[in-house]
Image: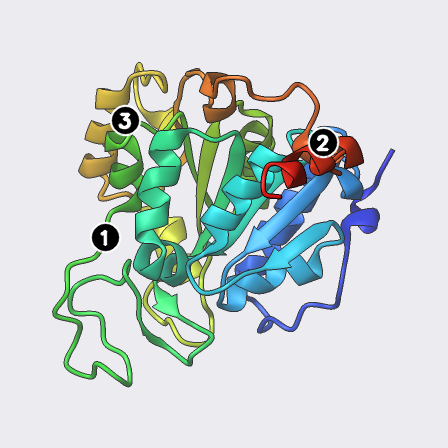
Amino acid sequence: MATVKDFKGDQPTWCPGCGHFSVMASLQKAAVDIGLEPHNMAIISGIGCSGKISEYTRAYGFHTLHGRALPIAQGAALGNKDVKIVAAGGDGDGYGIGVGHFVHAVRRNVNMTYVVMDNNIYGLTKGQTSPTSAQGFKTKSSPKGSVESPVHPLEIALVNGITFLAQGFSGDIKGLNEIMKAALQHKGFALVNVYSPCVTFNKVNTYDYYKENLVDVSSFENYDPTDRMQAIQKVRETNGLLTGIIFKEYRPTFQELTPDYPEIAIAKQDLNLDVAVLEEIEKQFQ
């Protein structure tokens, strides 16, 4: 049986205190807790500080183009159903240039997990406003404050039919680990949005800010995580500042709905063309 040490890859170069350390640790521990081995998991990541998680975790990995982690991950999930597919990226990567892929991945319900490390800023390029930055958020490139309204990824996911939605916080590694386990075990498309503070460039959305403002869904009276409308209501009431498993339901996956989807993973099939078949095809063009 694998241990967390078996999942450790290259030495991380994230800034000391970066929230991404907790995200990676939670993901690696969750993989061990549910019995995965490094060769049973693949991490497909986007561009940004968060994208380095595919290098820092010892598993199959693919560092894609900016905003393109989800199409690659969906292809991997369809091609090899025997490997746990995890897409990972940041708010800029997933909710900016990649938001179109995000919406369609949600509605397709491909069996995979998507982990977004949301720090409300572009960290790798030294601190510009991101799609989740609040209106009025000030940076060196927007000293008078952002004029744009932020996107609301939890609401986008819910209204487009997400089957598993959870939100965690890097400052609560125990709670985040439980969320990661549930997401990895979910059959369908699972989104885990994580508030992962950038200690270098974001002095607003800090660990202290989230500790003071986040509300756990377990504190809501009679909260039903299978009630989509209630989930939307609570997300709006808290302005998205909530943690825990927000919504979950079972719906047939893309793989299950695909006619003649192969029982044996495509990656494990013999795709070599039989010589006799090839000769018959050639005869048609002679």
Describe residue 121's horizontal placement relative to residue 147 as left or right: right
Mark 3 vs mark 2, foreground winner is: 2
Describe residue 13's horizontal placement relative to residue 91 as left or right: right
Of helix, strand and loop, which one carries label 3? helix
Describe residue 228's horizontal placement relative to residue 119 as left or right: left
Dot placed on the residue nearer the N-terminal end, 1 or 2: 1
Dot placed on the residue nearer the N-terminal end, 3 or 2: 3
Q: Which residue position holds label 1?
A: 151
- Which image quarter holds the N terminus? top right
Residue 128 versus residue 10 in the image, above or below? below
User: Do callouts 3 and 1 mark residues in contact (Cβ within 8 Å)?
Assistant: no
Which of the 4 image quarters holds residue 31?
top right
- The circle drawn on residue 281 is none
Dot placed on the residue nearer the N-terminal end, 3 or 1: 1
Mark 1 vs mark 2, foreground winner is: 2
Q: Amino acid at mark 3?
A: Ala
- The circle drawn on residue 277 is 2
